[in-house]
């Protein structure tokens, strides 16, 4: 399609969005038992010129809030005024979980394990099916925004199936220093989308039920980088993003016994093999247990709840060929994010 070709209106859920306009479409996904309809608002920004259809979704796990704020800021950004293609931004996919401040649906199911879903299945299956057929199937590319689970924080990172070249290019374009090649979990939005040829990357940053300003800024910047990479905006003056590093592998450090966990390293720390990284003790007496890093790597995930049971995950460590470079990139990246005002005018991080 040539750049001069006339763009057709974008039809979604019976709503017609004209080229060069933005509309908020309410997708009725469920109803409360009080007969209150529960809609999922979808912001549709339909450009005047042809281009990809990018879906940016958040809170498919209802308590993962950084992405909700990333999308709020993204929608105010000036570069969306002249868009090639279409942006579908869904700040809250799991509206049930968002209302109840939980990851799950009312039947304890995980919406991000319910794809592709079905019209007649469980609540989760029906919601997944609606979202897939009405929204996901309309997209050519997608970015799904997540955080760590409750009490677990993630260093800003991209997870993606790097065997797909288009997906790998999006993962690199996002511009955070750490990329993890991850196998697609069954029933996830990502698995279903990739299976039908829609490249998807997952941005993981911060902790459930918390806002983290650095993670939010890195997320806004990353999504804008992807929009630019896909040719949806004109030339930009900003610096090219840092070359990301792909983790060779990653592993979890688990609690060897029940007790009170004292972490001794921060997210992003460069760990040496055998380094003391935490302690498990008990206020009721007994010996402390020292926790040593099982490998060299970068700390990409951390449990923030001091009360732990044996076997619980405490740390997530990613291994790299060039661990020193990753550590240096992270330093530059973090100071860039924290120094200036945010992309939509927030003051520097205090
Ligand atoms: Zn999640």
Image (cartoon, rainbow, N blue to C red):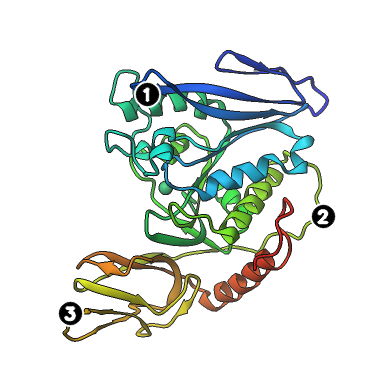
Sequence order check, earlier mark of 3 and 1: 1
Relative to 32, does residue 246 appear above or below in the rendering? Answer: below
x then y, percent, for residue 265: 43, 77
| Quarter of the figure with the C terminus | bottom right
Q: Nearer the viewer, residue 320 or 47?
A: 47
Question: What separation in Å lies between label 1 and label 2 (alpha carbons)?
Answer: 47 Å
Sequence order check, earlier mark of 3 and 2: 2
Sequence order check, earlier mark of 1 and 2: 1
According to the picture, the residue beneath numbered tag 3 turns out to be: 284
Q: Nearer the viewer, residue 163 or 237?
A: 237
According to the picture, the residue beneath numbered tag 1 turns out to be: 32
Q: Is residue 347 left or right of residue 64?
A: right
Residue sitting at 55 percent across and 38 percent down? 91
SS type, badge 1: loop
Dot 2 alpha-carbon crowd within 10 angstroms: few under 14, some 14 to 19, many 20 or more: few
Dot 3 alpha-carbon crowd within 10 angstroms: few under 14, some 14 to 19, many 20 or more: few
x then y, percent, for residue 131: 46, 27
| Quarter of the figure with the N terminus | top right
The numbered dot on residue 237 is 2
x then y, percent, for residue 96: 39, 34
Relative to 60, does residue 179 appear above or below in the rendering? Answer: below
Q: Quadrant of residue 308?
A: bottom left
Q: Quadrant of residue 255?
A: bottom left
Q: Disc 3 beta carbon < 8 A from ligand 1?
A: no
Report how many numbered discs are placed on residues in the image. 3
Q: Disc 2 beta carbon < 8 A from ligand 1?
A: no
Question: What separation in Å lies between label 3 and label 2 (alpha carbons)?
Answer: 59 Å
Residue sitting at 81 percent across and 47 percent down? 235
x then y, percent, for residue 85: 70, 31
């Amino acid at each position: 399609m040539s750049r001069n070709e006339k763009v057709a209106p974008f039809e979604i859920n019976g709503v017609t969005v004209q080229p060069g306009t933005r509309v908020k479409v309410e997708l009725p996904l469920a109803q409360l038992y009080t007969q209150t309809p529960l809609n999922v608002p979808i912001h549709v920004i339909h450009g005047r010129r042809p281009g990809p259809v990018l879906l940016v979704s958040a809170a498919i796990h209802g308590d993962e809030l950084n992405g909700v704020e990333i999308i709020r800021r993204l929608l105010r950004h000036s570069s969306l005024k002249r868009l090639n293609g279409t942006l579908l931004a869904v700040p809250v996919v799991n509206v049930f979980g968002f209302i109840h401040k939980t990851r799950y649906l009312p039947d304890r199911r995980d919406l991000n394990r319910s794809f592709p879903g079905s019209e007649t299945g469980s609540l989760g299956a029906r919601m997944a099916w609606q979202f897939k057929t009405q929204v996901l199937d309309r997209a050519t590319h997608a970015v799904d925004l997540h955080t760590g689970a409750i009490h677990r924080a993630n260093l800003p990172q991209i997870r993606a199936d790097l065997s797909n070249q288009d997906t790998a290019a999006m993962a690199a374009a996002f511009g955070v220093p750490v990329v993890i090649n991850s196998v697609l979990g069954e029933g996830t939005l990502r698995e279903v989308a990739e299976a039908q040829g829609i490249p998807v990357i997952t941005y993981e940053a911060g902790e459930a039920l918390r806002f983290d300003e650095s993670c939010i800024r890195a997320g806004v910047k990353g999504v804008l980088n992807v929009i630019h990479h896909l040719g949806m905006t004109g030339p930009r003056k900003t610096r090219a993003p840092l070359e990301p590093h792909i983790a060779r592998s990653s592993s979890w450090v688990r609690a060897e016994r029940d007790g009170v966990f004292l972490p001794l390293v921060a997210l992003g720390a460069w760990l040496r093999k055998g380094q003391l990284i935490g302690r498990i003790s008990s206020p009721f007496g007994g010996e402390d247990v020292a926790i040593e890093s099982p490998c060299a790597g970068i700390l990409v995930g951390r449990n923030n709840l001091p009360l732990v049971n044996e076997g619980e995950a405490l740390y997530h460590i990613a291994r790299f060929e060039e661990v020193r470079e990753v550590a240096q990139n992270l330093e530059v990246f973090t100071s860039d994010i924290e120094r200036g005002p945010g992309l939509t005018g927030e003051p520097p991080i205090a």
